[in-house]
Each structure stands twice: as structure tokens, then as C-alpha cells.
Amino acid sequence: MKKKIGVLLPLIAIIHIILAQGQQGFISLDCGLPSTEASPYEESYTKLLFSSDQTFIRSGGNGRIAKNPEGFAKPYTTLRYFPEGKRNCYSLKVEKGRMYMIVARFVYGNYDGFDLKPKFDLYLGPNLWTTIDLQRLGTDSTSEEILHMPTSDSLQICLVKTGETTPFISALEIRALGNDSYITKSGSMRRLSRTYFSKSGSNIRYMKDVYDREWVSYGEYFQKEWSNISTALEVNNSNKYLPPKDVLINAATVTDASAPFTIVLPSGGSGEEYYLYAHFAEIQDLQANDTREFNISLNGEVLSDPIIPKKLDITTVSSVGTCQGRECLLQLTRTSRSTLPPLINALEIFTSIRLPQSKTDENDVAAIKNIEGNYSLSRTNWQGDPCVPRQFLWDGLNCSTTDMSIPPRITSLNLSSSGITGNIAAAVQNLPQLGKLDLSNNSLTGEVPEFLGNINSLMFINLSRNNLSGSIPQALQRKGLELLVEGNPMLCLSNACRKRPKKNILVPIVASVASVAVIFAVLVLFLVLRKKKSATVQGTPTENDTFANKKSRRFTYSEVVEMTNNFQRVIGKGGSCMVYQGTVNGAEVAVKLLSQTSTQGYKQFKAEVDLLLRVHHTNLVSLVGYCYEGDHLALIYENLPNGDLKQHLSGKGGRSIINWSIRLRIALETALGLEYLHIGCTPPMVHRDVKTANILLDENFKAKLADFGISRSFGGCEAQEFTEVAGTHGYIDPEYYRTNRLAEKSDVYSYGVVLLEMITNKPVISEEYHIAEWVGTKLNQCDITEIMDPNLCGGYDYNSAWRALELAVACTDTSSSKRPVMSQVINELKECIACENSRMSNNQGLESQEINISLDTSLVPGAR
Ligand SMILES: *[C@@H]1O[C@H](CO)[C@@H](O)[C@H](O)[C@H]1NC(C)=O
Ligand SMILES: *[C@@H]1O[C@H](CO)[C@@H](O)[C@H](O)[C@H]1NC(C)=O
Ligand SMILES: *[C@@H]1O[C@H](CO)[C@@H](O)[C@H](O)[C@H]1NC(C)=O
Ligand SMILES: *[C@@H]1O[C@H](CO)[C@@H](O)[C@H](O)[C@H]1NC(C)=O
Ligand SMILES: *[C@@H]1O[C@H](CO)[C@@H](O)[C@H](O)[C@H]1NC(C)=O
Ligand SMILES: *[C@@H]1O[C@H](CO)[C@@H](O)[C@H](O)[C@H]1NC(C)=O
Ligand SMILES: *[C@@H]1O[C@H](CO)[C@@H](O)[C@H](O)[C@H]1NC(C)=O
Ligand SMILES: *[C@@H]1O[C@H](CO)[C@@H](O)[C@H](O)[C@H]1NC(C)=O
Ligand SMILES: *[C@@H]1O[C@H](CO)[C@@H](O)[C@H](O)[C@H]1NC(C)=O
Ligand SMILES: *[C@@H]1O[C@H](CO)[C@@H](O)[C@H](O)[C@H]1NC(C)=O
Ligand SMILES: *[C@@H]1O[C@H](CO)[C@@H](O)[C@H](O)[C@H]1NC(C)=O
């Protein structure tokens, strides 16, 4: 006896494992299942394994239907209701890019004793999915189904209170579908009906349907003009839709063989647009002289070629049709050579559903969830998407939400007076567009982290009334950043303990008393002329201190003479300036000397220096210093030993040709530099002269944009070209050229041209065409190898090449409004790089083409 029991137990376990395997990609939640009951459990009719929903949501109460509990399967007898909060969300893990069927079920059953049927909204992430209105439906229960491909790994299903009644839900069922079935261009579809043509059958679900679609039998609605047929033989159901065999063995035909088979489609289509999937299989034994052939049409419009159902084998016709404002009739009409009436086995009807609002940027969501976890915050409205819809914005956040098609970004975080403890969460640095951070009046401890200074968009930080210690990092003392730290008794504010930056200041201060005075004068002018937005650091440093903190310095003319060894080596030349090689403290620099006859006045020069001093970004060439002494005007830049991108594309000057993956990285870095100019600086700046010759490469081939803003305020070397429209021929935005209105999108255009150059290595302008036109004509031929730079020898991932090309084409759109903004460009490039990286990791070993770094030390800001 004992032995028998011992054998039985593992057997039960095995059965459960097999079931769970068959249900891979399924999530079956019994909402409101009391914690006293077993979870998961096997539902007796479908054998589906249902679990409690409590780990997927953190709000709501449990209810149980009072009316007709025997009429429903166990998962639908309990429910979760949401008396509190406007929006309550389930959060589920899914596989990004996979097609899912999502079913939500609602059985009211007078669970609350009010006998008042609720009405509320159902959201999928930030978008309205549908309104649940049992009052209007006049029923006690309903279900909603959507076929949807998630754009991230998490899926949010939210119930939103819209009136007096309380939202509730009985079950949530998520099913991963086959990859190539139900693909539509609109993305997501809402089910209107899924029926099969049986007069007596019952509804069919899992396990007969591998995807657990619910096929509703026509039953009592079977029309009297129809006749039911069925077969005992097996019907082959294998195509990408895989409808159950038990569905396909039934069909309906018309009794009057000459009449069409007519089905009135359910209303409720958005714009009455219908997606139809009709399944056919010949299940009658035909005579040799018999044919069955028919057309399928929607309100008279034929949807496909004539259909001849195959013997005991499936044919699926999928089609889209619209019925504007009319009753919608689907008709099967036999063709003239058909001897038998039309037949149909099963029909699925969907309507497209628009989900226009993008979810908040995935990385921002991850960061804010991390912060939430670190501080154990449990705010009731921190559910669903953090930023959108705007009326459900999480408390303490603000986001950029101007364009629905762009993922919103978190721009402000306010956790003031939230009782939080511990360090300042590291995840804050993963919110790159953060402009405001308020962590004041908490019990935060530890040091003020340096990373806060690296969030370029940060303009305001309030850390007052905490218990922070240590000192304030140098990086936080940049201009345009307001930092409040009062009420942190342990924090050291004196200059003595101010942390120095890691890199030493390039040049020691060797300023004479006289030049200190000049520095003061210049500085005061800067401060007066600039809109006053000073960095308020507790224990404000002296002005002298602020200036010394700058990495850029003022030099005397004699120092310039010395550093260039009396202007010995010319490395570049322009209309009104010369560029010389120099050394400052052993470090290589490029010295751009303006000719004395140049019309540059003090004001313009000062404006230029001011501009350059306040931009600091790793992908922008940085200014080491400047010289302004009498007629002598000079700008001193950091050294970039690898020259410019133009030389590398052309292979001129002994430069190596760089491979695709490095090109993508350079493109991304350039984009980051531009994005900084467009949105990271205040006020924003337009570069106006983005071109390959202005993209310089350091010793690691890291890209740095040069000459930023010069043309706007300065004219650079090419002052003679400085007419109304500045820039370089071929790169100038045609719209700007026409309207003379300058905006960030003009840089996007020039950037697009650069990207086209990097992709094709074609001249920007030749006698016959502009590079964008050339690409435009080639694009129609669909062969990307024709377009790509032949020097790349096919060494690129096709996907990444196509995406980069499409991006470049979008950037060079003649209409500025159709061009993306730089942050979109950046996101797209990251995807391109991911594609290319996966190719590289697949090809490891095959592709060990090293870059041939030439040791030419020319440094060329502004020289061309
Ligand atoms: C379907 O797509 C997913 C995700 O892209 C993939 O993991 C899976 O292998 C695919 N399945 C089939 C049958 O192609
Ligand atoms: C048609 O449906 C009736 C039930 O209404 C059933 O008794 C009959 O067997 C069905 N006929 C066929 C051919 O399936
Ligand atoms: C069913 O159809 C598929 C594709 O048409 C075919 O590969 C398969 O062999 C068929 N199965 C049977 C049992 O006839
Ligand atoms: C088809 O052939 C059968 C005999 O095989 C005959 O009874 C029937 O009338 C024929 N039908 C037509 C439409 O010719
Ligand atoms: C069926 O559709 C075809 C085109 O697909 C058309 O030529 C034919 O006239 C249609 N026949 C009927 C009976 O509607
Ligand atoms: C914050 O959370 C992340 C991930 O959840 C974890 O790695 C990190 O250690 C946490 N930091 C603190 C300070 O709790
Ligand atoms: C949030 O940001 C928007 C601009 O994106 C601004 O109009 C709004 O005033 C901000 N709200 C708060 C509470 O700061
Ligand atoms: C943060 O929120 C508090 C109230 O919760 C408010 O007093 C404070 O002004 C907010 N901080 C910012 C920077 O808006
Ligand atoms: C600081 O937080 C406490 C509660 O944590 C609150 O009572 C107090 O009003 C807050 N002070 C300010 C200035 O916001
Ligand atoms: C900074 O935070 C403190 C404490 O909450 C508050 O008293 C002060 O008003 C805040 N400052 C600003 C400028 O918001
Ligand atoms: C602040 O932190 C120090 C240790 O860093 C601790 O000794 C002190 O009690 C804390 N003060 C408050 C008010 O929490």
C-alpha cells in the first residue's frame, strides 16, 4: 500500500508540469482570489492554471459575486474592486515585440449588494482601450479582448474610475500568440466577435485551442436561412492561425443554393473599420461533377479572389474593409461555375484600435522604479505609466509630454518631505533630462554625489534640511545650476574642502596683478550682460574662485607666442584666421589666431568666449583658453590628434577608413553633442555649421563637434562668407535658406547630410545632384548595397544600415516639421548600434579588422 501512494504523488506532479509547459506564454489571473485559497489551481473545465492576482497589483479589495455563482467557472466568481484612487494598474511581464491576446473579464454579480452596474474605463498603458459599461450593455458580465504587441517588457493594464461607480475586474488572461498571425499595420486590434458555425455546439477554448481563444457557437442565433453541416472526419487545421479542429468540423451553408450567405457584422468598429479572418474547409463529400466556389464581399466590395475550400483542409482569408455609417454586410456569393452554395466554418471580426500615446521612456521608467524601491515609497498614484496620460502624472514628477509620438521623459522629481532615508539614489543619474530635483526636508545621509553635476539639464537642486555630509563636488558648481544645501549640519561648505576635479587644470595660473584686474573686468561684464542666473551655492564662492574653477583661461599674447613657438607650425588656414600648433603645459593645443585686420570687435569676441565658456560636453571640443590683447585675438582649443571625420571618410592625409560600427558611434556622439547644444544649454544654441569637417576625433576616435555657434556670433575663419545665411553649401537647411528662420531643426538637416555622407561616402554636392537626391533615387531600388559606402565591403548589419539610412532621410526632409529632434535621433541610433553589435558578436573572429590609427598629430578646429 505504502508503495502505491509513493508512486502516485510524483505522477500528480508530472501532470502539473506538463500542463504548465503547454501553457507557456500564458498568464491566467483570478482577480480577487482570497489569500486563504490555494494558488495556483487548475480550472476544471479548461485545465488552465489560474493564480491569484495579488502580486501584480497593490491596491483594491476582494469581492465575490452574489448572483448566480454556479453559472460561472471558479476564476470568474471572485473579483477585485477599486474604491480608492482614480487609476489602478496591473503590471505584467511580457516579451517585447511578441503578439499577445489580452483578455479582461468582468462579472458584476451584485458583489457589493448595490445592484448598480458599474461603468469605468480600461487602459492599456497610457492609452484608452475601451469603456466598460455594463449598464448600457444591460448584462451582468462582459469580456474584452485585444491583440497587441507590447513595445516594452512590461504591460500595464489599468482600471480608471470615471464616475460614481467602482471599477472592478474578475480575471485577466494573457496569451502569447504565434509570431506571424494577426499582424496588421495599425498594430492592435479589438475583438468584436469570434464565432463558429455550429447550431448545437458549445463554446470552445483551451486545450482544443492552443492559444485559448474562445470560439462562440452560433447556437440559437443560427439563422433559419442557413443549414448546418458537420463531419466526423479530421480536418487539417495547420496554418498560422491554427483554429481548433473541433471548430472546423462544423460549417454553415445556405438552404437556397442560389442565395448569398449573409452575415450582419456587429457594430462598434472604430470608423467601422473591420479586420476579418474567415476560416474555410470543405467538409462535405463532393461528387466529381460538383464544385464549390464563391466570392467574399463586404457591402458589395469583393475582398479576395474566389474561394474554393480545400477538402478537409483549412483556408483562411484575412481582409480589411470599411463600412462608413452603413450597416455592414459580409456576403458569400457563389460564382457562376459553382454547383454548390457557399460555406463557412468560422469567422473572427476585429476592429483596429489606435494607441497613439507613447509610453514614458523605458529607461526613465526603470530609473524611477529603482528610486521608488530604494526609498520604499508607496504612493497610491505611483501606478501605471509615470507621465501619461497627464491627468495621472505621478505625484512629485513632471515630464515632457508635448508630442504623443515621442516617449515622454521625466523632467522633474520632487520627493521633498517624504521621510526618505539613506543615500541619494544612484538611479537619479539615469534620468538624463531631469531639470529639477527636490529632495529637501528628508533624512538623507552620505555625500552629495558627483553624478548630479553630470546631468546636463539639471538647473535646480534642493537638498536643504537633510543630514548630508562631506563636501560639495566641483561638478555641481557649474553655471546655470542652482544648488540649495542649507540645513545639512555635517556638510562642509568652505572652499578649503571643495573637491578638485579629477583632471588637473591644464594651465597653472600665472596671472600678473594687471591681468587679474582685466579678468575681473571681463568677468563683471559677463555677469552684467548675461541674464542673471547665478549658481547659488551655500557659502557662495568669490568671483575670483568661480573664474579659477573654469577650465578655460585667459592668456597674454606673449604666452601665445611662446606656446606656438613663435607660430612655427601652421595646421590650418581660413579667410580671416590661421590655426597653429601649440603646447600648454606639455599638452597639445590648437591656437586659432584671428587676423588683425578682422572686423571682430571686442563685443563679438567677448560674446564668443562667453558662449564657449559655458558649454561643456564630452562631445564638444573644449576651449582651453583665449587671448584678447589689443589687436590680438586668439582661441585655444584642446588637441584632437585624429583629425576630422571628413579626412577619414575620404582617406585623405593618410587617414584610415573607419568601419561601420565606429561610424555609428561617431554619429551617436555627434548627436549627443548637438542635443546638448539644443536642449542642454540655456539659452539653447544652434550650431549652424554641422559638417564632417567640423567633427573632430580624439585619440580614441571619440567624436567632438567643433566650431559650435561660431558662425552665429563670430563668423569663424570664414568671415567673408558670413552673409545673412551662414553655414556650408550643401549642408544648409533649404527651409532656413528660404525663410531665414533659424531653429534646431536646421542643425538636424545638416546632421542628416553628415549621416548620409557617413553611409554613402558620396560627395555632398556634385555637378548632377545633392547627396539627398542621389539617395532618394537609389532608395526606390531597394538594394542597400548600392547605397552603402563600397569601402565598407559589406561589413555591416543590413538592419542597422537600413535604419541609419531611414533616419538620415528623415533628418534631411525638406520640411523641418517632419524631421526628428535630436533625442529621437539618439534613440534610433542606439537601436542601430544594438543591431550592429549583435552582428558583431555573431561574427566574432571573422571581423577583427583593426583601425589603423595614424600618428599624425594635426589638430584642426576651424581649419579646412
Ligand atoms: C517568435 O518570436 C519570439 C520573439 O521574437 C521568439 O523568441 C520566438 O522564437 C519566435 N517563435 C517562432 C516560432 O518563430
Ligand atoms: C444540425 O443541428 C441540429 C441541432 O439543431 C443537430 O441535431 C443536427 O445533427 C445538425 N446536423 C448536422 C448535419 O450537423
Ligand atoms: C496539413 O497541412 C499541412 C500544410 O498544408 C501539411 O504540411 C500537413 O502534412 C497536413 N497534415 C495532414 C495530417 O494532412
Ligand atoms: C452529378 O452526377 C450525379 C451522378 O454521379 C448526378 O446524379 C447529378 O445529377 C449530377 N449533377 C449535376 C449538377 O450534373
Ligand atoms: C467574383 O469576384 C471576381 C473577382 O475576384 C469577379 O470577377 C466575379 O465577377 C465575381 N463573381 C461574382 C458572382 O460576384
Ligand atoms: C537601489 O536599488 C538598486 C536596484 O534595485 C540596487 O542595486 C541599489 O543597491 C539600491 N540602492 C540603495 C541605496 O538602496
Ligand atoms: C510641468 O511641465 C510643464 C511643461 O512641460 C509645465 O507647463 C508645467 O507647469 C509643469 N508643472 C509643474 C507642476 O511644474
Ligand atoms: C516639492 O513639493 C513641495 C510640496 O510637496 C512643494 O512645497 C515644493 O515647492 C516642491 N518643490 C519644487 C521644486 O517644486
Ligand atoms: C518637513 O517635513 C515634515 C514632516 O516630515 C513636515 O511636518 C514639515 O512641515 C516639513 N517642512 C517643510 C518646510 O516643508
Ligand atoms: C528648499 O527646501 C526647503 C526645505 O523644504 C524649503 O524651505 C525651501 O523653500 C526650498 N527652496 C526652494 C527655492 O524651493
Ligand atoms: C546625522 O548623521 C550623523 C552621522 O553621519 C549622526 O551622528 C547624527 O545623529 C545625524 N543627525 C540627525 C539629525 O539625524
Image (cartoon, rainbow, N blue to C red):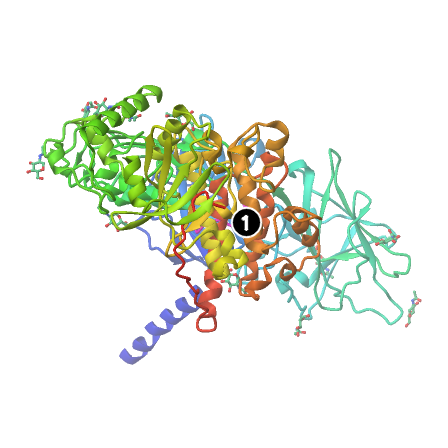
Q: Secondary structure at mark 1?
A: helix
Determine whether the beta carbon of the residue marked 1 sits less than 8 angstroms from the nearest atom of ligand 1.
no
Residue depicted at 32% across the width and 47% down the height: 565
Q: Is residue 83 left or right of residue 109?
A: left
| Res. 27 image quadrant | bottom left
Relative placement, left or right, of 256 versus 505 is right
Per the image, the residue denoted by label 1 is 755
Please identify the quadrant where the N terminus is shown.
bottom left
Q: Is residue 279 above or below residue 680?
A: below
Give, as a single range, the part of the protein colored magenta: 145-153
Q: How many marks?
A: 1
Question: Ligand 11 lies in which image quarter?
Answer: top left
Residue 25 in sight from this viewpoint: no
Q: Residue at x 38, y 55 (%)?
A: 857
Residue 557 included in the magenta stretch of the image: no
Q: Residue furthest top?
A: 528
Left or right, residue 328 beside residue 638:
right
Can I make out residue 618 in this image? Answer: yes
The percent coordinates of residue 677 (x first, y second) are 43, 36
Q: Residues within 10 Å of mark 1 (few under 14, many from 20)?
A: many
Q: Could you say where residue 299 lies in the image, as x and y percent from the top left?
A: 79, 42
Where does the image place residue 257, in percent across and percent down from the top left?
A: 86, 55
Q: Amino acid at mark 1?
A: Leu
The verdict on residue 147 being magenta is: yes
**Residue 347 in the image, given as x and y percentages of width and height:** 68, 52
At 45% across and 46% down in the image, what residue appears?
Answer: 572
Q: Nearer the viewer, residue 157 or 788?
A: 788
Pick the front one: 326 or 805 = 805
